Amino acid sequence: MRQVFPTIKNRTRREHAPHPQPFLTRGRGKTAGKLKYPVLVATFAIGIGWVALDRWVEATDIPSLSPPVSATVLDRDGALLRAYQVESGLWRLPVSVGEVDRDYIALLLAYEDKRFRDHGGVDFRAMVRAAWSSAKAGRIVSGGSTITMQVARLLEDAPTRSVRAKLRQIRLALALERQLSKNDILDLYLTLAPFGGNIEGVRAAALTWFGKEPGRLTPAQAALLVALPQSPERRRPDRYAERAKAARDRVLARAVGAGALSPGDARAARTERVPMARRSFPQRAAHLANRVRIANGAVRTTLDGTVQGELEILLRERARTLGPAVSAAAIVADHQTGEIVARVGSADLMDARRKGFVDMSRAVRSPGSTLKPLIFGLAFEQGLAHPETLIDDRPMVFGRYAPLNFDRQWYGTVSVRKALHLSLNIPAVAALEGVGPARLVARMRRAGAKPVLPPGDAPGLAIALGGLGMTLGDLVQVYAAMARGGEGVELQEIASPPPRIQASATPTPVLSPEAAWQVGDILAGAPVPGGAAREALAFKTGTSYGHRDAWAVGFDGRHVIGVWLGRPDGAPSPGILGLETAAPVLFEAFARVKARPDPLPPAPRSVLRLPNADLPQPLRRFRTRSAPVTQEDAPAIAFPPDGATLAWESGDPLALKVGGGAPPFRWLVDGAPLTADPYARQVAMLPDGPGFITIAVIDATGKAARAQFRVE
């Protein structure tokens, strides 16, 4: 520990002489002897005083050298996302000398304490000069306080008008110099100095008055920040701009005299206007910041502050076009590293009508059709289906569950690829019946999602269409696994997390690489929303029952983005659809994250890429393990109706339609077989000529329907 006043440990050399002589006998005559008495007394008194002062300083009661500072949440580059006031309501952000513009430090020392690096806490020369100047002027001209003395006052928040208070400040300043380095003392000043209102510290001041960090300041800005702590309330720029400017210019003038600033730079700085209003502190990623902040410290996240800001603007703008109660949420993640790049919890934090305080990125909602890709992926993995496998979209009953398509239409026999493109419900439920709902839930959990089922309920087929609860974060986890070739990854939002929450080094398999690629290939070919460019983007949309939630989740070769739109209170939002409403936001979000999507990975060599006709026989047509029954026990000819008369032009085919029954179907025309697709519910027939025609259709169970009509 460095001591400013060294203690007296050795006696004078004369005290150790072998033949000491009285001081009175040394010297020439009585006069010389008499002169030694005052010198001895003075020396002794000074020594005693020196020791006493040293012990007085050593016994100083030093307050805490770690004052509370604002909790801060930072992005991946250290930029401020959000800050919080300390308990007393002050904005006091942590800062150090290395984070502040060097020109500001030079101006500060030139104006406040030129010998800061040399004195031991108190500049007695400056104090004497200040006292003499004040005596001549008849008023206090300057106080002569060093930066260390100011830190002593700020640490104790005590007045300095009385002699006793000034002595206490001097004592504490001397003690601080023994315990702290010069940079440590500067750090305390930069953190505690007042800048008007509830602003303390140069970092909070730079953000308040200039909207920037103090790392790069103009000479005018630096000079203003030097001047404000001298009289923070009387020089507040937002209230007393002229006083602030005058004080700033005095700092500039003294800096020129001290050689800390060139005359030209000072002249240019005087022309710069002082700020007329306070700026708000950043409030990006507000919901995330509320969750991860720690008292009196900084938390660095994985977020990209620029992307975060862009997405907050995007969601706020889009939500305003959808109604006063609609909110929005979005998550952007790097599925290669597991880092969350942006996370927006609501459309507008301060909008009470939209319940902006609710973090909808963590709210449990119905995922609609967004789980269908994982369902078909499991079917691919288990060898139950292939993207080109044919599957029926017709009325079916699975036990007591009779799902319907969103548009209440039926598309007959389609490929699995088309079924996923059109987001057909019946094929998805049929595929889940073959895969098994429990397996689907297990794979979701393996991906890192936490699906919520009704209490006491086992997973059922309804989960294919959104019959369970999930968060936006859960969906992004699932899609991140599909984007990574089937390997799960734990998404992280805190940079350098503690070991107990580090992502596992061994990837968790969620899907086989082949199945994951097949799903991505299908989703990359899905119809894009109107106006969106066709990019290398695999995406899926979903709309929950009653138009309560609109989803869009997609990925490219590097990032996965999830978007949710709806009302936080769960009320329906008519007109809000996944493809028409959420998907455009998804595509715009990708455009704001990067100029162009990263390419999707190539197909694994083991992927079977064949048309339906060349597939192995079991993969040509999808069959569940327990075949569902149809809603109609027997087929019925829907067109032409029995007994109808149809106008017909020679050469034109007639359409024959069948409802109900179980394909494949066999058609008979006047007793002769009709060549047609056995799995189609509508076929074409060319009459031989006008007259009566009898048709019949037989389904897979042997049940038949018959009709007779006339063409003319």
Image (spheres, rainbow, N blue to C red):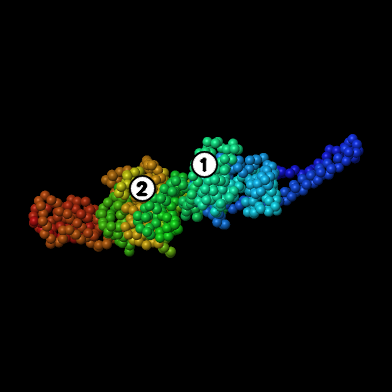
What residue is shown at x 55% (from left), y 43% (from top)? 249
Considering only vertical position in the picture, is 386 above or below 546? above
- Give the structural element (helix, strand or loop) at label 2: helix
Spot occupied by residue 548 in the image (x, y as percentages of width and height): 36, 59
Residue at 86% x, 42% y is: 37
SS under mark 1: helix
Label 2: how many Cα within 10 Å (few below 14, some 14–19, many 20+): many
Q: Is residue 515 visible?
A: no
Q: Total of numbered circles in the picture?
A: 2
Residue, disc 2: 587
Asked whether, in this view, residue 436 is left or right of residue 17, the answer is: left
What label sits on residue 270 in the rendered view?
1
> Where is residue 186, by image quadrant?
top right
Look at 88% across and 38% down and name the residue there. Answer: 31
Q: Could you say which is closer to the camera, residue 203 or residue 159? A: 159
Which residue does the image show at 23% across and 62% down from the upper left?
A: 634
User: Which residue is more in the foreground, 531 or 506?
Assistant: 531
Location of residue 473 in the rendering, given as x and y in whole percent from the top left corner: 43, 53
Give the CA separation, mark 1 to mark 2: 48 Å
Q: Position of residue 68 (x, y in %)?
A: 59, 53
Name the N-terminal-most of marks 1 and 2.
Answer: 1
Mark carried by residue 670: none
Residue 312 in view, yes or no: yes
Which quadrant, please, contains the N terminus? Answer: top right
Q: Quadrant of the C terminus?
A: bottom left
Front position in the image: 521 or 527: 527
Q: Amino acid at mark 2?
A: Phe
> Type of residue at label 1?
Arg
Q: Nearer the viewer, residue 279 or 451?
A: 279
Label 1 Cα neighbours within 10 Å, binned few <14 / some 14-19 / many ≥20 = some
